[in-house]
Amino acid sequence: MTDKFGKLIDSIVMKRKLIGLSLQSSKRLNNKTYSISSGYSQGFIIENKEVADFCEKIALEVGSIGPLNIQLRKQGDEFYIFDFHPRFSGTTPIRADVGFNEVDILLRNHLFDEKFGRLNYTKNVAAIRAFEHVIVPIDEMLS
């Protein structure tokens, strides 16, 4: 995360574990469409200086302003980026829950010129994102 001038504020490392399988992406019931989750995602907010340094360097090199989500894998000594997007991602609420509230910080920086340095957020914790359950008869799911 960088401020409105592209100065680094901080970064957070989440090791993700994706689990789940769904046969459909949505279902319409009683004139309402429900998105069907692929399961749930979980992750670990960890301290990993090597990953943080790599991602921070990339953010500064590309001139990022605001949030930047970099997803990568490490094979051997090399990092391979497979997703890179300058937006608030789906894990933004999870990060806010541990004190890394990008939305609040960037709004305060852009609107009120507040300055931020490294954040004191909670590390070495697991986060689970679960979804609301809707119970329907099997016949309705298969139709």
Image: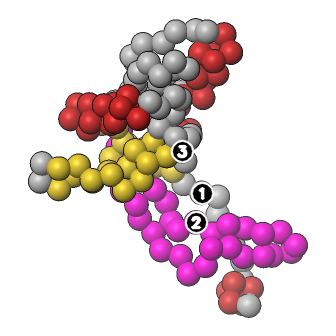
The part of the chain drawn in magenta is: 16-45
Residue at horizontal 74 percent and vertical 90 percent from the top: 143
Secondary structure type for disc 3: loop
Would you say residue 23 sits in the magenta stretch? yes
Secondary structure type for disc 1: loop
Is 125 above or below relative to 34? above
For marks 3 and 2, give the CA distance.
Answer: 16 Å
Residue projecting furthest to the front: 62
As drawn, the label of residue 131 is 1
The answer to whether residue 31 is visible is: yes
**Of tags 1 and 3, which is closer to the observer?**
3
**Within 10 angstroms of label 3, few (less than 14), some, or many (20 or more) residues?**
few
Name the one closer to the observer, 109 or 14: 109
Sequence-first tag of 3 and 2: 2
Residue 38 in percent (x, y) is at 52, 68
Residue at horizontal 72 percent and vertical 76 percent from the top: 27
- Residue type, label 1: Phe
Residue 21 in percent (x, y) is at 48, 74
Residue 141 in percent (x, y) is at 69, 84
- Residue type, label 2: Ser
Residue at horizontal 53 percent and vertical 76 percent from the top: 22
Residue corresponding to mark 3: 89
Sequence-first tag of 1 and 3: 3
For marks 1 and 2, give the CA distance.
Answer: 7 Å
Would you say residue 131 sits in the magenta stretch? no
> Mark 3 and 2 residues: CB-CB less than 8 Å, in contact?
no
Is 59 above or below relative to 29? above
> Mark 1 and 2 residues: CB-CB less than 8 Å, in contact?
yes
In the image, 79: left or right of 17? left
For marks 1 and 3, give the CA distance.
Answer: 17 Å
Residue corresponding to mark 2: 37
